[in-house]
Amino acid sequence: MQKPSSRTPALPAAVLIASGSILSLASGAFAQSSDWKADAISPVTNPIFFEDPQINSEIRPIFAWHNIGDDLGTGGAAQLYAIQARWAVTDRLAIIATKDGYINLDPDVGIPADDGWADIAAGVKYAVIDNKDAQFILTPGITFEFPTGNSRVFQGNGDGTWNPFISAGKGFGNLRFLANFGAIIPNDGDEESTQLHYSAQIDYTVCRYFIPFAAWNAFTVISEGKGLPVDFEGFDLFNFGSSKADGMTQSVLGVGFRSRLLDRLDFGFAYEFPVSQPEGLFGDRFTFDFIWRF
């Protein structure tokens, strides 16, 4: 065996010195706020159910281009145009409007192309723990989805659904973790399925204009309905009340970034793709949003 060169240790030493210099420059260029939440970002993926634990007043326009998965047998795509709103009544309590908008369905075969309004969902959330020193926030909440949408885009079925949830955020300097867990509980279990949903995100502030993240979102059917005879559900936007989906879990991964364009204006982009079978409706999805806080 060849004897190691006496100069070998110089390489890791040089790497450590260079890394330390880069980190020193970065810490000076991207100084952290005294409040870790000021640097934290909201989720981009799963916008209806992945609720930010922070309490903010904001307007959030959203556009999503969703390619329909092969399991439905139609191909094609769907688009969503929506605007969410949140109002911080106090520094711990917020009223939230999480679902609305207009849906455009454009399948290749099987069903006709159509468009119409989505259901409307709104509720409240309350930060029961907001520990600045520990960089930790814990926020439970609840929303109710009203069946106000158009049936031609698979909305308006059932008697509404409840979504009790809990969201949490933890910071480690420029690195942060977000998590959310909740349940979709329909008033009419025949028309819509009962499901659990869970989400997680890790993000890192490189600079204010580039905050990359990776996210995971999943839905599990715990009580199927008596609707469409398929073995999958409609993920976040649709609830088919599928009659063959009991126990089914759909999960997707997402990557993207946020950019803090102004102190009160964020831009977000995400790309999501399925990582479980069946894929159901989920071919892949591109999501774009802005968040204006006031």
Image: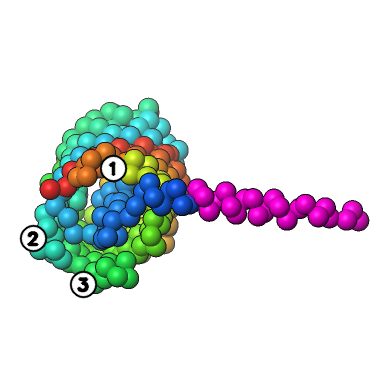
Please identify the quarter of the rendering in which residue 83 is found. top left
Residue 4: which quarter of the image? bottom right
Rendered residue at 50%/48% (across/down): 22
Residue drawn at (38%, 46%) of the image: 29
Q: Is residue 188 magenta?
A: no
The residue located at (32%, 71%) in the rendering is: 134
Residue 155 in the image: state x and y as whole percent.
21, 44
- Local crowd size for mark 2, using a 10 Å CA cut-off: few (<14), some (14–19), many (≥20): few
- The Cα–Cα distance between marks 2 and 1, rounded to whole angstroms, is 24 Å
Decide if residue 94 is on the left or right side of residue 22.
Answer: left
Residue type, mark 1 in image: Arg
Residue 62 horizontal side relative to residue 17, left or right: left
Instruction: Report the residue marked by disc 2.
Output: 89
Q: Which mark is residue 260?
A: 1
Foreground pick, 290 / 32: 32
- Label 3 near label 1: C-beta < 8 Å? no
Q: Earlier in the sequence, mark 1 or mark 3?
A: 3
Q: CA distance from mark 1 to mark 3?
A: 27 Å
Dot 3 corresponds to which residue? Answer: 128
Q: Quadrant of residue 130?
A: bottom left
Q: Secondary structure at mark 2?
A: loop
Mark nearer the N terminus (2 vs 1) = 2
> Of circles 1 and 3, which is in front?
1
Question: Can you give x and y, in whole percent of width and height, for residue 32 in the image?
Answer: 33, 55
Q: Is residue 288 visible?
A: yes
Give the magenta range: 1-22
Give amino acid for label 2: Val
Q: Residue at x 71, y 52 (%)?
A: 10
Q: Position of residue 15 (x, y in %)?
A: 62, 50
Display colour scheme: rainbow
In whole angstroms, how far apart are the C-alphas of marks 2 and 3?
Answer: 15 Å
Using the rendered image of the protein, determine whether residue 162 is visible from the camera's viewpoint.
Answer: no
